[in-house]
Image: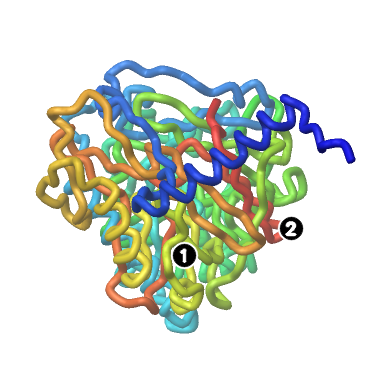
Amino acid sequence: MGANIISPTLLSAYLAVVCLVFTLKEGYALGRTPTVASHTVQVSSLLPSSICTSATKALDKKSSLQVVHKHGPCSQLYQDKANIPTHAQILLQDEARVKSIRSKLAEDLGRSTNLDQTDATSLPAKDGSVVGTGNYVVTVGLGTPKKDLTLIFDTGSDITWTQCQPCARSCYKQQDPIFNPSLSSTYSNISCTSSTCSSLTSATGNTPGCASTACVYGIQYGDQSFSVGIFAKDKLTLTPTDVFDDFLFGCGQNNQGLFGRAAGLIGLGRDKLSLTSQTAAKYNKFFSYCLPSSSSSTGFLSFGNGGVSKSVEFTTLSTISQSSSFYGINIIGISVGGQKLPISASVFTAGGAIIDSGTVITRLPPTAYSALRSEFRKLMSQYPMAQPVSILDTCYDFSNFSSVTVPVISFNFSGSVEVQLDASGVLYVNSISQVCLAFAGNSNDTDLGIFGNTQQKTLQVVYDGAGGKLGFATGGCT
């Protein structure tokens, strides 16, 4: 019988496979760890520039607004540098916001506070009933002729409001001229006997009041900021082609707080008075945004489903409580450096979670945060640690490095959706000598989890309110 002849090509391939198997076995035998998924970050890129660089292509779309950080050089509010808060102050305000979200969810709506029935400028007595004061702003037009106003946008709030002349009690300092309703031909007050007025209770947590015949709204935020005034309607211009008559909003006569010279706030929550619900006939409660990687670049806020990334993956939205206007999400796992952390899925379901555009730092159940921190510290052990900053307890000194290697962090949501965070979504930079892991632990596993805006940076986050879905796509701002 003739010998079996193996061709040189086949023999070469066979030897290559044997060699690969041997190498892998040897690697494990020698205790070599599998490759860690990581970002290489230039340390010089960690601090925002003082020059605005616009990176947004999405503004070609007709229903898009440019999003900027209210304290960055792309914002006209940035001119007032003296009032830019420190990182410690921002994180303290963030804590107040988180406590306020929890108190809102814990309260029975039946216990809402009545406004002073005689005084349209009274302060609502309820402490921290709703949340506000996010970091990102957009510019819209209000009235006829339209006046441009720079407003904070907030998925954790429902009512839209702006400061209004004559500021009967108090107005804080804002960059834009204060809106004067008497100069708008399309402005009108809402009557305090109307069903529209009574719908304020669910949107604000306060029972509306009455001044003469006008409906009085009052909203107070977790950091003690507030706005009280006349509930009204007027023409809202989002873009030249997207104009809405009879848009319901608060015309603030008594306003105080940490709004960073913005003229007020746009509520993108799930209540029927939110902008999302009021424009549902056109956009079907569909909007998306991308938050820029730093305060010196731009993102976008788009309404309708045009321009959504083809690579978007959707998870199911949940409702946290019967009265909740928040967007609930189901976190089921977290990976660090490409390895899934050994956290039971029940840890995430104990308190539930929401996604929030106005909370800066993601809050996790302590069991999950502890596992995340432990693995992150292990993979960052080559860098010297630095003092904590406020709620951030895992910080590093990068002052002697030109580049650093940071493990990739990914979140798993229901529906087999895995979202890899950008490097800017992993680190919170106080200074080059104090760069921190941008997560914090809750007090208890049963506390509400929050997927905050630092972690959302550069993702296209897509809200399909009518479809009950939330989508994510990486590289969303460019």
Residue 178 or 154: which is nearer the viewer? 154
In primary-sequence order, the first of circles 1 and 2 is 1
User: Which residue is found at the position 47% from the left and 59% from the top?
Assistant: 340
Q: Position of residue 225 (x, y in %)?
A: 29, 55
- In the picture as drawn, the residue positioned furthest to the right comes out as 1
Report the number of numbered marks. Answer: 2
Instruction: List the residue tagged with mark 1.
Output: 204
Image quarter in which the C terminus is found: top right
Query: In the depicted view, which residue is nearer to us: 338 or 104?
Result: 338
Q: Is residue 163 visible?
A: no
**Residue 451 on image: x %, y %:** 44, 56
Judged from the image, the secondary structure of the residue bearing numbered disc 1 is helix
Tag 1: residue type? Thr
- The residue labelled by disc 2 is 467
Secondary element type, mark 2: loop
Which corner quadrant of the image does residue 48 belong to? top left
User: Image height check: is 340 above or below 26?
Assistant: below
Closer to viewer: mark 1 or mark 2: 2
Which residue is located at x 18 percent, y 27 percent? 401
